[in-house]
Amino acid sequence: MSSVNCPGCGEPLDTRSRNVTCGHCQGRFRITALCPDCAEPLERLKACGAVDYFCNHCNSLISKSRVAFSASPE
């Protein structure tokens, strides 16, 4: 899984939840999973403890190791 850094201070953010607060600068951000092929937002699928991502634009399942994350202010 790719890491994403805080746009304000550059510290790493936790990508496991959609809304995060930076522990360093206290900035609040929304984490968005993006398709590595088309850069469209991905749908997060959770089942039996596993997390997968689906791209509605490409109509394909995306491995969590290929997902690109972005952080935007709330």
Image (cartoon, rainbow, N blue to C red):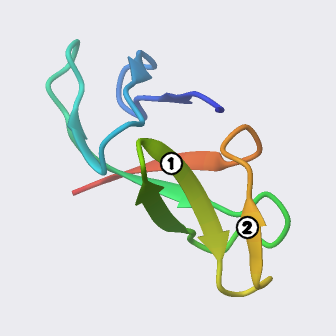
Label 2 element class: strand
Image position, residue 32 (x, y; %): 46, 57
**40 sits left or right of 49 in the view:** right
| Residue found at x 37% / y 37% | 16
Of the pair 3 and 25, the residue shown nearer to us? 3
Residue type at mark 2: give it: Leu
Residue type at mark 1: give it: Val
Is 55 drawn above or below residue 64 in the view shown? below
The label shown at residue 26 is: none
Is 60 drawn above or below residue 50 in the view shown? below
Image position, residue 41 (x, y; %): 56, 71
Of the pair 11 and 20, the residue shown nearer to us? 20
Label 1 element class: strand
Image position, residue 58 (x, y; %): 80, 82
Q: Which residue is mark 2?
A: 61
Of the pair 66 and 70, the residue shown nearer to us? 66
Q: Quadrant of the N terminus?
A: top right
Specify few, some or many for label 2: CA neighbours under 10 Å numbering under 14, 14-19, or 20 or more.
some
Is 21 drawn above or below residue 36 in the view shown? above
| Residue found at x 58% / y 28% | 3
Q: Which residue is mark 1?
A: 51
